[in-house]
Image: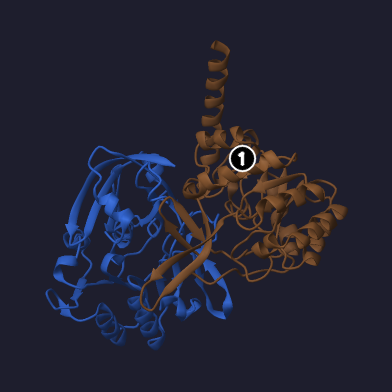
């Protein structure tokens, strides 16, 4: 899957892929976070590179659900793979409104309870198990199709994962970015607070996937620093049933094709090895 | 991403290097002045994100990148040698607008993108040549590619902060003097402080002013929405798909400070 926020709103995906390539290599497209009302996003700077990682603070820039449905969703659907809409709300009611708006319009939802770059909602949900219980339960009543929750890698992660399972989520995405900070200027001190992604976080998220997949029965979708087929295979071997590619799309928009090819080659290699032993 | 072989990577001026990458002509054909490439510096993951560089010039099947060492990425780039293979993405961004009767104002490494514009306009390929090029740097040692720039028969007026070559002072002083005499469109690229001054001068003399902007940039493809430029009336543009060249009157001045 292509992870939320790493392929825009799908306006120009076909500049980089033939439709056939999308169908053959991408299992699902997870859209950028969509909110009830349009959001401009955060002031710049929004990104900063760290060793093997990227801190971002985009702030869920999006046109709002009405405009998204009218002008973006049809194009995303035209790529011919399942579309999972990432939802962002500051209150539970907003998630419910968004779920209602998307009934019959998308193949799945991914509830974003883990964005570190907003003043309300986002990551704050991930510290509050009662709110998450209520959120998942109430969205589940409205939304009958595939429902995933994108967890934060910080906070009571295991408890939140169990709650998602208990209240009817079909999968959890492990995980969003790590709350992080970069110093941009020393004097006067200028900082960027955002979420860290990229290969720097892979060992941390891989551990979370490993632990969480032992605690719950619903599928864990691994997401964190995958840039190669080997990374993807590691996630699958450590308990993930699927994986998302995020930051790597910003390095090379066609990276998912390379990852899938490498993964197929590696799996073929593993298969042959076990057969011959 | 495409691959290209380095044919040279040589020091051109103080901290400024000229990189030549050999790439197939069918890819080069797509390049337009004002666009940029994202170059992957190495196959390790640090630096992680390929760095954006404007296209400086094209000759035969070689694309020229003129770059200044400013950080980890460009320092690593300067260490690469002839024969090594680089991966790159592009062309990205919108070309320069097609202007007539205009001048160029370049500060420091801001000169880089204008070489290709001069080449294309000399060949009368959709672009018109500027009337004059105003090019400033801190010192004589930081001026790059002067003989190349002078090849096109267009006046190149130089300034240095320390007076070691040309006019002593800022390039914007010369631009203001020119606009006072002959108001005309300005196309400018350079440090933020210079762009801000150009915007002010352009407003004062009521001329169309285009600024080539810079900001932190990750994807270069419109995917991440990281490279926003604040516009007036509280809106944002995305440098990689809406720019990098913007009309000064549309930009919020705080983005230049």
Q: Quadrant of the N terminus of chain A?
A: top right
Residue with the mark numbered 1? A210
* Chain A colour as displayed: brown
Q: In screen coordinates, is B197 left or right of A157?
A: left
- Along the line of sight, the residue nearer the viewer: B213 or B203: B213
- Along the line of sight, the residue nearer the viewer: A88 or A196: A196
How far across and how far down the image is residue A210, in percent? 61, 40
- Helix, strand or loop status at disc 1: helix
Residue at x 51%, y 74% (from the top left corner)? B230
- Along the line of sight, the residue nearer the viewer: A152 or A210: A210
Residue density around tag 1, few if under 14, some if 14–19, many if 20 or more, within 10 Å:
many
Chain letter behind tag 1: A
**Number of numbered discs present?**
1
Let me know if residue A245 appears in the view: no
Residue at x 76%, y 52% (from the top left corner)? A163
Q: Quadrant of the C terminus of chain A?
A: top right
Q: Is residue A249 above or below residue B176?
A: above
- Farthest residue in the top direction? A276
How far across and how far down the image is residue A271, in percent? 58, 19
How far across and how far down the image is residue A221, in percent? 66, 42
Q: Is residue B176 above or below residue A193?
A: below
**Residue B11 lies in quadrant:** bottom left
- Along the line of sight, the residue nearer the viewer: B144 or A86: A86
Q: Is residue A270 above or below residue B132?
A: above
Q: Is residue A225 above or below residue B156?
A: above
Let me know if residue B183 appears in the view: yes
Q: In screen coordinates, is A216 left or right of A14?
A: right
* Chain B colour as displayed: blue
- Farthest residue in the left direction? B164
How far across and how far down the image is residue A185, in percent? 38, 72
């Amino acid at each position: 899957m292509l992870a939320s926020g790493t392929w825009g709103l799908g306006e120009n995906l076909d500049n980089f892929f033939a439709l056939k390539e999308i169908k053959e290599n991408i299992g699902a497209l997870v859209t950028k976070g969509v909110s009830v009302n349009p959001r401009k996003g955060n002031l710049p700077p929004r990104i900063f590179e760290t060793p093997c990682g990227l801190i971002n603070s985009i702030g869920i820039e999006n046109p709002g659900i009405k405009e998204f449905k009218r002008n973006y969703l049809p194009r995303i659907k035209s790529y011919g793979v399942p579309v999972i809409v990432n939802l962002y709300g500051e209150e539970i009611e907003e998630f419910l409104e968004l779920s209602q708006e998307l009934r019959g319009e998308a193949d799945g939802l991914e509830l974003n309870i883990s964005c570190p770059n907003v003043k309300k909602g986002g990551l704050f949900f991930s510290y509050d198990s009662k709110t998450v219980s209520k959120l998942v339960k109430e969205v589940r009543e409205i939304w009958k199709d595939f429902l995933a929750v994108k967890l934060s890698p910080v906070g009571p992660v295991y408890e939140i994962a169990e709650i998602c399972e208990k209240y009817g989520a079909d999968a959890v995405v492990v995980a969003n970015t790590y709350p992080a900070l970069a110093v941009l200027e020393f004097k006067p001190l200028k900082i960027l607070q955002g979420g860290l992604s990229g290969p720097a976080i892979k060992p941390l998220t891989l551990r979370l996937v490993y632990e969480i997949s032992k605690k719950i029965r619903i599928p864990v979708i691994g997401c964190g620093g995958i840039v190669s087929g080997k990374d993807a295979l590691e996630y699958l071997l450590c308990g993930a049933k699927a994986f998302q590619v995020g930051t790597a799309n910003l390095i090379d928009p066609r990276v998912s094709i390379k990852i899938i090819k490498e993964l197929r080659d590696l799996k073929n290699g593993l298969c042959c090895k076990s057969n011959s032993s | 991403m495409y691959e290209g072989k380095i044919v040279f990577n040589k020091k051109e001026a103080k901290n400024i290097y000229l990189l030549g990458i050999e790439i197939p002509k069918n890819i080069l054909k797509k390049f337009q002045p004002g666009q940029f490439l994202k170059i992957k510096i190495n196959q390790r993951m640090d630096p992680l994100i390929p760095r954006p560089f404007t296209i400086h010039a094209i000759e035969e099947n070689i694309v020229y990148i003129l770059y200044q060492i400013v950080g980890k990425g460009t320092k690593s780039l300067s260490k690469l040698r002839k024969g090594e293979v680089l991966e790159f993405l592009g062309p990205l961004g919108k070309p320069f607008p097609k202007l007539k009767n205009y001048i160029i104002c370049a500060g420091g490494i801001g000169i880089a993108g204008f070489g290709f514009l001069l080449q294309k306009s000399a060949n009368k390929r959709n672009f018109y040549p500027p009337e004059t090029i105003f090019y400033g740097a801190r010192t004589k040692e930081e001026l790059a590619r002067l003989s190349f720039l002078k090849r096109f028969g267009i006046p190149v007026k130089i300034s240095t902060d320390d007076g070691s070559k040309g006019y002593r002072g800022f390039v914007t002083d010369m631009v203001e003097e020119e606009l006072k005499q002959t108001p005309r469109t300005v196309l400018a690229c350079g440090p933020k402080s210079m762009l801000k001054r150009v915007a002010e001068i352009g407003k004062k003399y009521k001329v169309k002013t285009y600024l080539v902007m810079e900001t932190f940039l990750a994807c270069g493809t419109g995917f991440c929405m990281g490279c926003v430029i604040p516009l007036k009336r509280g809106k944002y543009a995305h440098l990689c798909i809406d720019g990098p060249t913007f009309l000064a009157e549309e930009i919020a001045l705080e983005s230049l400070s």
